Amino acid sequence: MNSELSEQLTVRFLKEVSIPKAIGLILTISALAFLFIVWLLYFKETAVTSATWVDQLPALNALLNSASTVLILSGFVAIKKKKYVTHMKLMLTAFITSSLFLVSYLLYHNFVGHTPFPGEGWIRPVYFVILVSHIILSAFVVPLVLCSYYFAFSGKFKTHRKVSKWTFPIWLYVSVTGVLIYFILNAYV
């Protein structure tokens, strides 16, 4: 990447934020978000609503996760072709669709709470292996994505590439398994 393009993609104030300070903030935000989701799913009483749109949110979540998957893969192809601006736009759009998914997911579980899996037989352990790996990796993907963005927008592209080598497969896995969980759960509910 030439230095002029590098300068255009860099957010100036992020260059001034130290790496330890940025990572500390990212980890704090990520931990608080994860704890909030655990509280929402397992400890908070569900809100009461008769709104029919709530029942449509799981399908919207699957759609948003599918869009994220396509955008992440497209961003990967763009960076391999050295199309840096296209890569940036695709990855920012993937972040937006993933963020919209999170908002929709939180809304749904605010009204519905935890969704138990009613399937029996061989599908039950398969479902839970996918679900548990999805949950664990989703906790790690948030700080990885935020670190990837911090390093990219602060002009630390070498570090961005190193972090993104971990971020890419984990984010892709979480997006794909989110859709898979929806379809498996939907087949048994």
Image: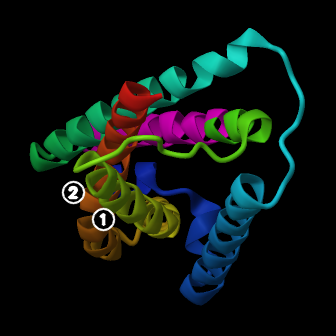
Under circle 1, the secondary element is helix
Query: Considering depth in this image, is 54 or 122 the residue closer to the camera?
Result: 122
| Amino acid type, callout 2 | Met
Residue 120 placement (x, y as % from top left): 34, 45
Q: What residue is at 47 percent from the left and 61 percent from the top?
A: 135
**Left/right of residue 53 with respect to residue 167 in the rendered view:** right
- Asked whether 20 or 95 is in front, the reply is 95
Q: Secondary structure at mark 2?
A: loop
**Residue at position x 18%, y 40% from top?**
78
Q: Residues in magenta? A: 83-104
- Residue 31 sits in which quadrant? bottom right
Question: Is 183 positioned to the left or the right of 41 in the image?
Answer: left
The dot on residue 94 is: none
Q: Among all residues in the image, which is located at the extreme front?
A: 121
Q: CA distance from mark 1 to mark 2?
A: 16 Å
Q: Which residue is mark 2?
A: 1
Q: In the shown orientation, is residue 116 left or right of residue 108?
A: left
Magenta span dominant secondary structure: helix
The location of residue 110, given as percent across then percent down, is 78, 40
Q: Report which residue position mark 1 lands on.
A: 164
- Note whether 5 is above or below 57 in the view shown: below
Q: Is residue 40 magenta?
A: no
User: Which sits earlier in the primary sequence, circle 1 or circle 2?
Assistant: 2
